[in-house]
Amino acid sequence: MTVLYLDASALVKLVVAEPESPALLQLLRAWPVRVSSALSLAEVPRALRRAGFSAGARRRARDVLARINLVDIDRRVLAGAAALDPAALRTLDAIHLATALSIREDLQAVVTYDRRLTAAAQRAQLEVLAPA
């Protein structure tokens, strides 16, 4: 089974229309198994709230997240996140990357629109997609 990992920057594009949303939706039509970190349950609604989106957008986020397989954050993932380079990688992005690495055997690619996470994932020799 090959899976596609989506970080919060990708998940937000499934909730609110952004220029990359149509290309991302097209990619996902061909990919039935999608995963993210359980961190997304908090990160996506917080990102929407911070950007001033309505409660309706946050409800849509819950619907989107309900269709994603969420990987729990355990001590192994947290220890992996703590050890990742580069030092400039933000904590939440490090947790996303460590989560993706924890399912590496089944992972086909990471979908992210975040430059720092892209660089760190490529450094870890993961395929990164950012459909636009």
Image (cartoon, rainbow, N blue to C red):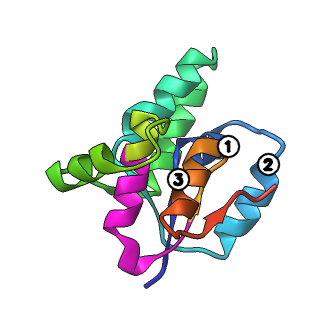
Q: Is residue 122 toward the left or the right of residue 30 in the image?
A: left
* Label 3 – label 2 distance at C-alpha: 21 Å
Indicate the position of residue 86 as horizontal and vertical percent values: 47, 45
Three-letter code for the amino acid on which mark 3 is drawn: Ala
Location of the C terminus by quadrant is bottom right
Residue receiving disc 2: 20
Left or right, residue 119 beside residue 107: right
- 28 above or below 113? below
Relative height, residue 90 to residue 128 (above, below):
above
Disc number placed over residue 120 in the picture, else none: 3
Looking at the rendered structure, the kind of residue marked 2 is: Glu
Front of the two marks 1 and 3 = 3
Check if mark 2's residue and mark 1's residue have beta carbons within 8 Å.
Answer: yes
Q: Is residue 114 visible?
A: no
Question: In terms of secondary structure, where does tag 1 sit?
Answer: helix
In this rendered view, identify the residue nearer to me: 122 or 70.
122
Label 2 and label 1: CA atoms lie apart by 7 Å
Magenta residues span: 95-109
